[in-house]
């Protein structure tokens, strides 16, 4: 029986590498994007049975429609990968609004929960749920509070899914990714790349294919007893105590005005 996987946010970077890996391994693949045309175009470029779907991960009706389309096309699901994410860059306790909270938490945690809920309905012969989480789930840096909260929530969801779905033969795990080489790296100079690598114990970044390999392992029989875990694939970032910069707000373009406002008059700027 040919297996089926759905991966969210898979028109580029990590999600695309995951989709390509499973298509190459002979799975039926469904990929999503908020841009339906982009998902269809990416699907067409891949070898094998690949279905491109429009889906906003923050929208539960969209999620349900995407899983319904998978059911109609492939009739089953064996793996669900929650990859799409709002990166929440520059959002701190000082500047985050109610709308920011909804945007980040919904795109990241709500999507993982409601996607899993739909996935379970299609996993008739067991299955594997994988959340692409982040080393931010366990550690924090200034200006990423909502992203950190959303990725930490994934740990609770994954542990709960593991205990609730074990009897159905469905396993759930998260990958605590850190430092994946994406298209955003194209804008970095060689010196900036070298400076990044120098901060990490492994001295190099993961490729999207490295993350895809870990997903493939977690979706394979080799991982048949692995469930409820958060597995780091992060160049050692998660075990490394980084130097804290108490002037972070002064140096952060998104938060600098709060620094300026609070300076000298004792106000916090909120
Ligand atoms: N890159 C890293 O170094 C790194 C490190 C740690 C963890 N991670 C995690 O690894 C996963 C993949 O990361 P990546 O860097 O490869 O991803 P990415 O390309 O930045 O994002 C993946 C997809 O998420 C969707 N997305 C972006 N912003 C969104 C928003 N505001 N609301 C809803 N969807 C949005 C986009 O899909 P569409 O525009 O097509 O809808 C995008 O293609 C993410 O879960 C990320 O948190 C990445």
Image: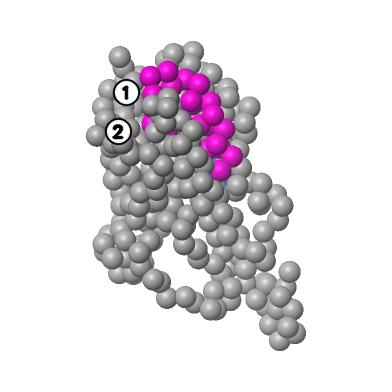
**Image height of 257 relative to 163, above or below:** below
Q: Tell me how far mark 1 sits from mark 2, CA to CA.
A: 18 Å
- Farthest residue, direction bottom: 264
Q: Residue at x 35, y 52 (%)?
A: 232
Q: Nearer the viewer, mark 1 or mark 2?
A: 2
**Image height of 159 relative to 95, above or below:** above
Residue 110 appears left or right of 199: right
Q: Quadrant of the C terminus?
A: bottom right
Q: Residue at x 30, y 33 (%)?
A: 224
- The x, y position of residue 78, in whole percent, is 38, 24
Q: Residue at x 57, y 28 (%)?
A: 63
Residue where numbered disc 1 is placed: 27
The image quarter containing residue 19 is: top left
**Image height of 15 relative to 90, above or below:** above
- The x, y position of residue 23, in whole percent, is 31, 26
The magenta-colored residue range is 109-130
In terms of secondary structure, what is the magenta stretch mainly? helix
* Local secondary structure at mark 1: loop
* Local secondary structure at mark 2: loop
Residue 49 appears left or right of 159: left
Residue where numbered disc 2 is placed: 224
Q: Which mark is residue 108?
A: none
Q: Quadrant of the N terminus?
A: top left
Mark 2 neighbour class, 10 Å CA radius: few under 14, some 14 to 19, many 20 or more:
some
Asked whether residue 231 is in view, the answer is yes
The verdict on residue 111 being magenta is: yes
Q: Looking at the picture, tell me which residue is in the foreground, 261 or 168.
A: 168
Q: Residue at x 65, y 51 (%)?
A: 101
The verdict on residue 237 being magenta is: no
Asked whether residue 15 is in view, the answer is no
Mark 1 neighbour class, 10 Å CA radius: few under 14, some 14 to 19, many 20 or more:
many
């Amino acid at each position: 029986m040919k297996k089926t996987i759905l991966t969210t946010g898979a028109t580029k970077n990590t999600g695309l590498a995951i989709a390509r890996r499973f298509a190459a391994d002979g799975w039926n693949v469904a990929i999503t994007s908020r841009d339906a045309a982009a998902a269809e175009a990416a699907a067409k470029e891949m070898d094998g049975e690949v279905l491109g779907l429009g889906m906003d991960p923050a929208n539960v009706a969209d999620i349900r429609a995407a899983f319904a389309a998978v059911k109609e096309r492939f009739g089953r699901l064996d793996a669900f990968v929650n990859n799409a994410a709002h990166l929440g860059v520059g959002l701190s306790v000082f500047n985050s609004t109610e709308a920011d909270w909804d945007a980040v938490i919904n795109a990241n945690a709500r999507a993982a929960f409601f996607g899993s809920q739909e996935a379970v309905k299609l996993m008739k012969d067991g299955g594997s749920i994988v959340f692409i989480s982040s080393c931010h789930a366990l550690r924090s840096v200034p200006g990423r509070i909502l992203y950190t909260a959303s990725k930490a929530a994934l740990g609770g969801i994954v542990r709960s899914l593991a205990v609730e779905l074990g009897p159905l033969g469905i396993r759930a795990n998260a990958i605590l990714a850190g430092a994946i080489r994406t298209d955003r790296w194209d804008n970095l100079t060689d010196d900036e790349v070298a400076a990044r690598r120098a901060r990490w114990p492994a001295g190099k970044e993961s490729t999207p294919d490295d993350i895809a390999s870990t997903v493939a392992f977690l979706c394979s029989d080799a991982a048949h007893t692995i469930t409820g875990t958060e597995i780091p694939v992060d160049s050692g970032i998660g075990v490394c105590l980084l130097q804290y910069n108490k002037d972070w707000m002064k140096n952060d373009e998104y938060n600098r005005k709060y620094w300026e406002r609070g300076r000298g008059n004792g106000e916090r700027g909120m």
